Structures are given as C-alpha cells and as structure tokens.
Amino acid sequence: MIGIIGKKLGMTQVFNDQGQQIPVTVVEAPPNPVLGVTAKEKAGFASVQLGYGQQRTARESKKGEGKPRGRRATRAELGHAKKAGLEYAPKVLRSFRLDDAPGKNPEIPSYKVGDVVNVGVFAPGDQVKVTGTSKGRGFQGIVKRHSAGGGPNTHGNTKHRRPGSVGPGTDPSRVIKGKRMPGHYGAARHTQTHLRIEKVDAERNLIYIRGSVAGPTNGIVLVRKQS
C-alpha cells in the first residue's frame, strides 16, 4: 500500500460519464519527498516516510534583529531533511506501510531516499481510505456530543438540555463506565474507508474523492490505497 499526504481544500461536485452529479472532496497533494525507507528485514514491515509542506528556518545572522517570531525548524529536522537532498524541513512527516496490501503475493513497491511520490500513484476508480483529524468543537453537552433528545420544552420543565440522572443511588451506587456525559468533542483522528477516486488532476496536484472526509478546510489528510 502506498499513500500521500495532502491538504483538504473543501467539497464540490463533478459529473461522470452517465451525467450523474457526484459530491467530491478535493485534496491538494503536492509531490511528497521520501525522507526515510524501512526495510522489512529490519523492522518486520516495509515502509516509507514522506514529507509535506515546508517549515520556516532560523535566520543566519540575527545581529541587530529582534527575536524571531513563531516556531522554526530545529537543526535535527534540517539534518534529517538534508539526507534526502532537501534544503528545508518538511512541516509534516508521516510513514506509510508498503507490505500490507491485500492478496496472497502483493507486489511491494521499492523506493529510496530522495524519491518523490505524487498523485500519479492514484487513478480514477481506485478505492482509498482517508485519515484526518475531525473538527474540534471544545466542551459540549450531551445533546450536541451524543445527539441526545433533551427534555420537554413546555409544562414547566427547566431541564431542556440537561443529562438527567447518571446512575442509580442504591445499586450499583456509582456511575457506569462509558456513560454518555458532557465533555470534549471532536479533534480526534478518524479514518473513512472505501472511498472512490473520481478524478486525478496531475497538473494541479489535485485528487477528487467521492464523499466527505474528516477535518476542516486546509486540514492535513492521509490518502492511502485500499483493496
């Protein structure tokens, strides 16, 4: 299996050969450099480490200048990227397994440090799974977090969006584990499987994926091939 790191641009629609309107998510995936290769004999599985984006680097001369604002790439990150022939440190690093493709004798693609993976590894009709981080919604109650029905809005009720009783007082005299309660909602890793690629625009590094994927606009997503 091979994949690519991209950025979710949003949703739009395309029309297939039958004239059907299909909602798609557009992912921008510029060429990802290969920064590391793990052999199956060494770790028990074959994988590659891909990079995305570009971090800012510290200025060479800081004399007479104010303190630089924001995070800069560390020398360790720059040294790791330099081994792959890069003059900058990627903003995102992710590893992709190569030997977990389905089938009895899957063909493991071979890469070396310095290679580049682009949207050409995908084709219309391929099935993929997309991993992203869902939108963070902060602290929420059970109505929004768990789709609870809430209480009545009339007849003197004042507990419209309250959770109500959370457990019996006599037996078991405690709150059961897993009870749906208010709390932090969203900002969680989510993988959507069995999505279909409808279109690949190699000139603009765009992938059109049928349906929706987790994450906000401009969120980082991982697109991986699936059987």
Image (tube, rainbow, N blue to C red):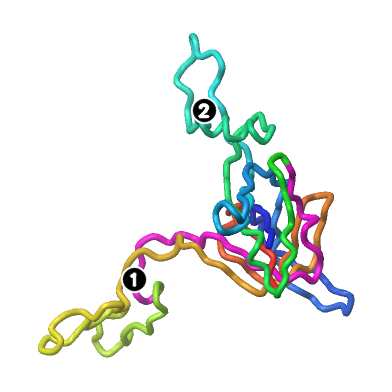
- Of callouts 2 and 1, which one flags the residue occurring earlier in the amino acid sequence? 2
Query: Of the residues shown, which amino acid type is indicated by label 1?
Result: Gly
Q: CA distance from mark 2 to mark 1?
A: 44 Å
Above or below, comparing residue 60 to residue 51 in the picture: above
Quarter of image, res 84 = top right
- Closest to the observer: 211 or 113? 113
Image coords of residue 210 (percent x, y): 71, 71
Above or below, comparing residue 149 to residue 9 in the picture: below
Q: Is residue 98 magenta?
A: no
- Label 2: which secondary element: helix
Badge 1, how many Cα within 10 Å: few under 14, some, many 20+? some
Instruction: Give the numbered dot on residue 141.
Output: 1
Magenta stretch bounds:
115-143
- Closest to the observer: 99 or 87? 99
Q: Nearer the viewer, mark 2 or mark 1?
A: 2
- Label 1: which secondary element: loop
Above or below, comparing residue 52 to residue 13 in the picture: above
Badge 2, how many Cα within 10 Å: few under 14, some, many 20+? few
Residue at which label 2 appears: 75
Quarter of image, res 4 = bottom right
Identity of the residue furthest to the left in this view: 170
